[in-house]
Image (cartoon, rainbow, N blue to C red):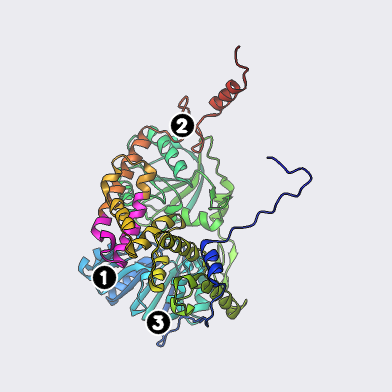
Amino acid sequence: MSQRSGKTPPRKTKRPSRSQRYAAREGLHRPAVELTVSLPQRQTEPESVVAHLGPTNSGKTHDALQFLSEVGRGVYAAPLRMLAQEGHRRLGERLGADRVGLVTGEERINEHAPIVCCTAEMAPMRGEVLVLDEVQWAEDEERGSAWTRLMLGAEYRHILLLGAVEALPLVENAFPEAEIKFFERKAPLDWIGGRSIEGLRPGSVVVAFSRKAVLALAGEVNLRHPDRVAVLYGAMPLSSRREEIERFTSGRADVCVATDVLGHGVNLPCETLLFAETTKFDGESRRSLEPWEIAQIAGRAGRFGFHEKGHVGVLTGIPWAKPDPALVRDALTPTVELPGGHRGYRIVDTGRLRPQLSDLNVSTPEELAPALRAWRNVALSLIGADSWLTVESIAPLLARLDAVLESLRRHRRKLDVETVWKLINAPIDEDDGPLLGELAAAVARDSGAQQQLRWLLDPGRLTEASLEEAELAARQAAILRWFALQFEGVGGVTLEKAALLEEAAALAVIEHLRAEIESPTIGRCRSCGAVTAPWATLCDRCFQARGYRERRPRAR
């Protein structure tokens, strides 16, 4: 690195965001109107509030869905689309498909049915029975307000809150008079220490924490169990996940290699669960797993009705995978004290709030960024440090707002503030900002953007797509499904076309996974084919040899 002799290096300053730069140009440093900070409120109190608290595989969801089935009218609200789909399937099998609907940001099936399964953000604010699953999500920094909104404002005759025992303080804050029912695991967990790949038995699940690690391990397992391994990871399309889950549950696959997606509502008939890793990259750094994360994943072992008990351990014999056995073993016993003498893994006692558009009192999209920041500051000052409520992060909203406003300026288009607000509340990740920008331009009738959407909808573009491109297409298809429901007919985007793209992407992903597992390239040295770490392209021997060749003096 070069340095300026005798001079102090210039200080690096953080570049303002696009919305900040626009606000500065337009004199929009802060909104000139009054902001509103309003708490969700209900006019009619529920007749009953019951909390089902306990670990995975304890029957708390089963009992709640049984109550919902007996009443015959109400809502099951979950944090994930896959969980809502699972609830829809289970209730449909019990009551008949005509009596159960499904509503998520990406799909509508029989949405006016007496019982509706949905994601938390899509749950209606009134009805007969509300079963609110994974209530501890109220503390989530980016989505918690959906749970807080329902707990504080939803008007149902009966409310059932489901969650981990760690959520006991949260439940008592929101409903001091709630009836609490504690559930215990129906199949106990046993610590079994280390097991090798050679020792894997049917019904085993191996857990790692990246797609590359999962695929590398799946390739190793396939050498011992040809065509008998399934894989699960977060970037997989939902239909691909369902196919892999079905292969494992039906017995067509003996072993499943998965990421921590397993801890989010994926119910497998798993007898033995082995951690191949006990560290993960959390978006900022690689860190050791928290005890509650380990417990949530480990709890998937020993599914009641399939196995008398679950076995938990670590995978041994893989040079690059070095799990910490003590970390896993110790995490099987909760140590954090909770009210009433109960023990858990952490304390969940906070609910998040976020603004509605009406709270911001703005008239143009350009006023949204400064209004959001001002609302956050006002809300924090009003709530106070001793409240169990706090404010949801506005960073995702601001990032999506940047993408939308930049696209509109680039295409020289305008949209009203209500439409922009709808767009920036899309269920997408920050990485999908460019697509959100194209969607905004398409809504604003930009022909180029609409043509781009028509190209995106074409399944033919996946003919020679890589695994990463197929995964991206599946994610885009889910966003386009949401778009078709929000902006019907815009840019030629329909629910049917988006669903076809999602199906084609899922098939492409499965084909790539089968090819990679049968003839591994990840976790293999590209020079000699020896086993190596999944993040490396050369084994140590070939890497050192290459370095030696590069250092040797050339012959003259």
- Numbered-mark total: 3
Question: Disc 2 and disc 1: Cα gap in Å?
Answer: 48 Å
In the rendered image, residue 251, in percent from the top left (x then y), is placed at 30, 45
- Check residue 539 for magenta coloring: no
| Residue under the image location 50 percent in, 43 percent down | 276
Assign a secondary structure to mark 3: strand
Q: Nearer the viewer, residue 120 or 16?
A: 16
**Lower sequence index among marks 2 and 3:** 3
Where residue 111 is drawn, which disc sits there? 1
Q: Nearer the viewer, mark 2 or mark 3?
A: 2
Q: Which residues are magenta?
A: 473-499
Judging by the rendered image, the residue that carries numbered circle 2 is 524
Assign a secondary structure to mark 1: loop
Give the amino acid type for the residue marked by disc 1 in the picture.
Answer: Glu
Q: Nearer the viewer, residue 409 or 545?
A: 409
Q: Quadrant of the C terminus?
A: top right
| Residue under the image location 46 percent in, 31 percent down | 524
**Lower sequence index among marks 2 and 1:** 1
Q: Residues within 10 Å of mark 3 (few under 14, many from 20)?
A: some
